Amino acid sequence: MEILQIGGVSCRKLADEFGTPLNVYDENKIRYQAESAVRGFSSEKFETEVVYASKAFSSIALFRMLGEEGIGFDVVSGGELYGVIQAGGDMSKVYFHGNNKSNEEMEMALDAGVGYFVVDNVMEASRLADIADRKQRSTKALLRINPGISAHTHEYIMTAAPDSKFGIHIKDRKHIEEVIQKLSRSRYVKLSGFHSHIGSQIVEAESFEKALETMIGFLAGMKADMGLDNMELSIGGGFGIRYLDTDKPVELGDMCSRMVAAAERYTEEKGVSISKLITEPGRSMVGEAGCTLYTIGDMKTSGDKNYIFVDGGMSDNIRPALYDAEYTAVLAEKPDAVGETTYCVAGKNCESGDVLIRQIRLPKAETGDLLVMKATGAYGYSMASNYNRLGRPAVVFAADGNARLVIRRETYEDQYKLEV
Ligand code: LLP
C-alpha cells in the first residue's frame, strides 16, 4: 500500500510516533524557500535583506534554521522577539513592527540591540526617541507608510485605503514630516528609511511592482522636499502560496528577483537611490512546507452532507472559519486513489463554523484513516487557540527520512498551568 511521505517519513509512522493532530513541516522545503528568496533578492545596485515575518509560524527551531540561511526577522511583539533572542538570532537583522508597542517592549528591544524599529505613528516616534535617548541605546527606524494600494487575490485592484490602522497614509505629509522631525532630534534613533506592506496572499507580481513604483516615487518626493536620499526601503511581505491545485502563485524566488528588478528600474527612472531593499515574506516561507495530520473519527450524514470528523478543528486552524480559507487534503494511505465521495471535513470544536473543508472529493474514507490537510504551515499553529481545551498539536520537522519533535503537544496540565 502506498503511503504519503513527508520529508521522507511515512505519515503513518509520524502519526504513530507523535500522535494526531500533528503539524508536520518538510524542513528541506523551508530551506529551499529561504535559499531561493535570498538568491532571488539580490542586487548589484543596493544592499538587500530577506526578513521572515515570524507571525506566520514562530518557533525557536525555525528561527535557528532561518538564521543559518542568513535571514532576518520581523517581530510584532515582545513575545515574538523573545523567541528570536532565545534562538540566538542576529539582532541587527531584527525589525520590530507593530502598532502600539508598549514602553516595556521598546525597552526590551533596545536592550536586546534590535536593528530596526518600524514606526507606525507620531506618538510612537516620540516615545521611541525618548526611551532610546534615556537609555542611550542606538537603533534605526523605518517609518511605515500606507501606500494607498490594496491588492486582492487573483486580480489586483488598487484602492486608496486611507483609514487603515497601519502606518501613515502616503498623502498625509503633515504627520510624515512630524515623525521625521521628532526622530531628527533624537541622538540615538536614526530614521534610515520607509516601509510599506500592501496585504497578504497576493499571487501576482504586478501589485508589488505597483507598490514599489509608488514608494520609490514617494522617496523621490522625500529627496526633493526634505533632502532625504539613499534611504532604505522595505516592501513588506504578502506573497501568495498554493493552497489549492488551481492556485497559481509566482514562485518566491522569481517574485523576489522581479521585486529587485522593479526597484532597480524605478530608482533609475525616478532619479533616486536606495541603500537597501528589504522584503518580509511570512506565509510563502513556511506555508506549503507544512501540513496537518488528523485522524478520522466518527462519520455521519446530516441532510445532504457526508461528514468526516477529525480530531482537531478550528482550534488548530482558524483560517477556514475566519477567512473562508480553502484547503485541500488527501488520505495518507490512499493518496492517489480516485475521489469517489464528496465529504465535508469538520472538526471537534463546539461551533457550527468548525468546518475545515466544506466539500472535498476523497476515496472512500474510514474511521482511523489519516487525513493530511495541505499547506497549513502558515497562520495555522500561530493562530491556534485553547478553545474547548483541545490542546495545541505537536509540531514535527521532517527531513531526509528523519523526524524530530520541535514543539510538544499541549497537555491538560499545560492548559491549566496559569491558574493561580
Ligand atoms: N510584513 C508585514 C508588515 C505584515 O503585516 C505581514 C502580514 C507580513 C509582512 C507577512 O505577510 P505574508 O508574507 O505572511 O503574507 N492571519 C492572516 C494573515 C495576516 C497577515 C498579517 N501581516 C492569514 O491567516 O491569512
Image (cartoon, grey):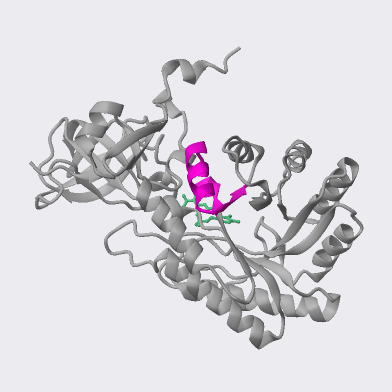
* Residue 415 location (% of width, % of height): 48, 20
Q: Is residue 391 visible?
A: yes
Quarter where residue 145 is shown:
bottom right
Whether residue 264 sits left or right of residue 330 in the image: it is: right
Quarter where residue 403 is shown:
top left
In this view, 10 is above or below 411: below
Whether residue 34 sits left or right of residue 5 in the image: it is: right
- Residue at 55% across, 51% down: 53
Query: Closest to the observer: 83 or 312?
Result: 83
Query: Closest to the observer: 124 or 24?
Result: 24
Which quadrant does the C terminus fall into?
top right
* Residue 136 location (% of width, % of height): 87, 44
- Residue at 71% across, 85% down: 271
* Residue 410 location (% of width, % of height): 43, 24
In this view, 319 is above or below 260: above
Q: Which residues are magenta?
A: 52-75
Query: Closest to the observer: 209 or 90?
Result: 90
- Residue at 65% across, 59% down: 164
In this view, 253 is above or below 24: below
Indicate yes or no whether the magenta region holds residue 45.
Answer: no
